[in-house]
Image (cartoon, grey):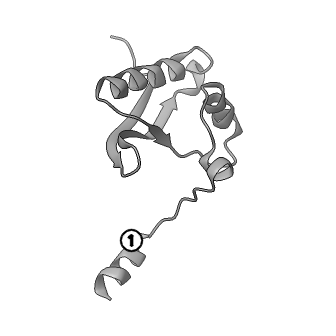
Amino acid sequence: MVPAVGYLLYFYTYSTFEGRMVFMEDLYVSPSYRQQGIGRALVKALCEEALSKGCCRFDFNVLDWNEPSIRFYKNLGAVNMTSAHNWNLYRLSLDDMRKVAQS
């Protein structure tokens, strides 16, 4: 039996500007298996899947302190939308959602 050494979690969503897209929620490769092409292979597989489903875009978030991941994604051709296009991520917490729902 081969052990699981990584995973990629994603879901499909929709862009009103461009149509169907995929959002990568998480990519993880066990530290002892990094630098072996596993992360790239997982992202490649998702790109192939997304293209076969007619997706026009692949979005994800990366924390600004995570330099190794930023380098990895830039190597793949990813663009930081905050610095390039001024798209800012906003969030309503659970408590804030409750406040809005009750207002």
What is the x, y in percent for residue 59? 48, 41
| 58 sits left or right of 78 in the view | left
- Of residues 51 and 9, the one nearer the viewer is 51
- Of residues 87 and 3, the one nearer the viewer is 87
Q: Which residue corresponds to the image point at 53% horizontal and 27% vertical from the top-left?
A: 30
The image quadrant that residue 80 belongs to is top right
Q: Which residue corresponds to the image point at 56% horizontal and 15% vertical from the top-left?
A: 37
Q: From the viewer's perspective, is residue 76 above or below residue 79?
A: above
What is the x, y in percent for residue 96? 42, 77
Q: How many marks?
A: 1
Hey, what amino acid is under mark 1?
A: Leu
Does residue 55 appear anywhere in the picture? yes
Q: From the viewer's perspective, is residue 52 above or below residue 58?
A: above
What is the x, y in percent for residue 53? 28, 28
| 91 sits left or right of 101 in the view | right
Residue assigned mark 1: 94
Q: Which residue corresponds to the image point at 64% horizontal and 29% vertical from the top-left?
A: 72
Q: Which residue corresponds to the image point at 65% horizontal and 25% vertical from the top-left?
A: 75
Does residue 5 appear anywhere in the picture? no
Q: From the viewer's perspective, is residue 7 above or below residue 95?
A: above
Q: From the viewer's perspective, is residue 97 above or below residue 30?
A: below
Q: How busy is the neighbourhood of tag 1: few (under 14 within 10 Å), some, or many (20 plus)? A: few
